[in-house]
Image (cartoon, rainbow, N blue to C red):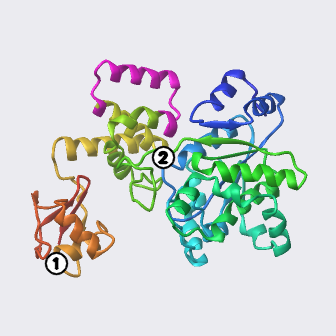
Amino acid sequence: MIITDDKKIDELLTRGVEEIIDKNQLRAKLKEGRQLRIKFGVDPTSPNIHIGRSVPLLKLRDFQQLGHKIILIIGDFTGVIGDTSDKESERPMLRAEQVKKNMKNYIQQAQKILNLDECETHHNSEWLNKLRYQELCEQANIFSLNDFNSRDNIRRRLDAGKRVSLRELLYPLMQGYDSVVVKADVEIGGTDQRFNLLAGRELQRHYGQKPQDIMTNPLIEGLDGRKMSSSWGNVINLFDSPDEMYGKTMSLKDEYLIKYFTLTTRLKLTEIEKYQQALTEGLNPRDLKMKLAYEIVRFYHSEEAARDAQAFFINTFSKKEVPDDLKIIKPNQLDIISVLVEAKFSTSKTEARRVIEAGGVKVNSIVIDDYKLILKSGDIVQKGKRFFVKIK
């Protein structure tokens, strides 16, 4: 059943939306009562889907709840090629084996937001592996070099004398051809994807299809204030544990609270407006941040998990207590660097040393700066505010 309620369509077209091309046309399509094909593609450039990606995924969910067909494309081919839409330097090609490994749990992660039983799911290697040079040249002929150079990040790189590979210029053709194959009515993507989304419209025209409408979503800031990115590690991942998800959310900068409520949750907008007013009237942002953390954990895990994560946070960080269910490890080596790596608090010995030098590690509640420290049984190692382990 297709829902054509004006109020729901209005929210669909405004909440978490930066731009729509063509908005009037899309509204008219939504009012027709015809099921639309809504496309979204994601490249598995890392093993995790982070909450920044939830912004378009939640928008897909909004479309799905109105009865429209979601077309989810896992970019196993484009993930190898690499999209540099949001990059200030050349993104290296990934090995196909790495992309295959990265996408192992992508469907399960997307399932936390979408009803995948009602989605159409594809890997774009299904058709991109079959393209011939002649077809690729026909597609490339639609665009000029000036079209690509007009993109802000490409122009900045060229002006700075940085290399721009021909491979990078072909990426929008691949994403655009995805739209042709699945016959998309609408494509959703971040604001950094605008050129690629528009390329889909041009390619659809070339192949005799009606051009898709496009909807861009705002990008959200990560935990350090920069754009959320797996390569920077400033992310909240959909597969994070409840405690980790809650704790990370609590480290968010205050100025992004309302933006996160609006873009990463589906609380009613009237309720979020009340939160905004409360902040204006002097509400402690920390109190509101706890509501946000609770809602995010509740959505991706459960109500019980959210209650437990909140209690863990209050007991551990507000009351400065060490957690009751402290993880215990028996490391192969007892030096602090090796322990941090074995506990997976650091990805390498170099990173572990850097964290220690920055004052981010405590042993038995005391900040240490000796990266040669040898631990003993019973010592409690803490990294940052959220990670604890006891030595056996």
Q: CA distance from mark 2 to mark 1?
A: 36 Å
Q: Residue 200: give x, y in percent of width and height.
A: 75, 52
Q: Secondary structure at mark 1?
A: loop
Quarter of the image where one finds residue 63: top right
Would you say the magenta stretch is mainly helix, strand or loop? Answer: helix
Which residue has dot 1 on it? 334
Residue 371 belongs to the span the image colors magenta: no
On the rendered structure, is 36 left or right of 376?
A: right
Instruction: Identify the mark at residue 223; answer none if there is no mark.
Output: none
Amino acid type of the residue tagged 1 in the rendering: Leu
Q: Residue 256: give x, y in percent of width and height.
A: 39, 37
Instruction: Identify the mark at residue 300; answer none if there is no mark.
Output: 2
On the rendered structure, is 15 left or right of 258?
A: right
Q: Earlier in the sequence, mark 2 or mark 1?
A: 2
Residue 116 in view in this figure = no
On the rendered structure, is 194 left or right of 326?
A: right
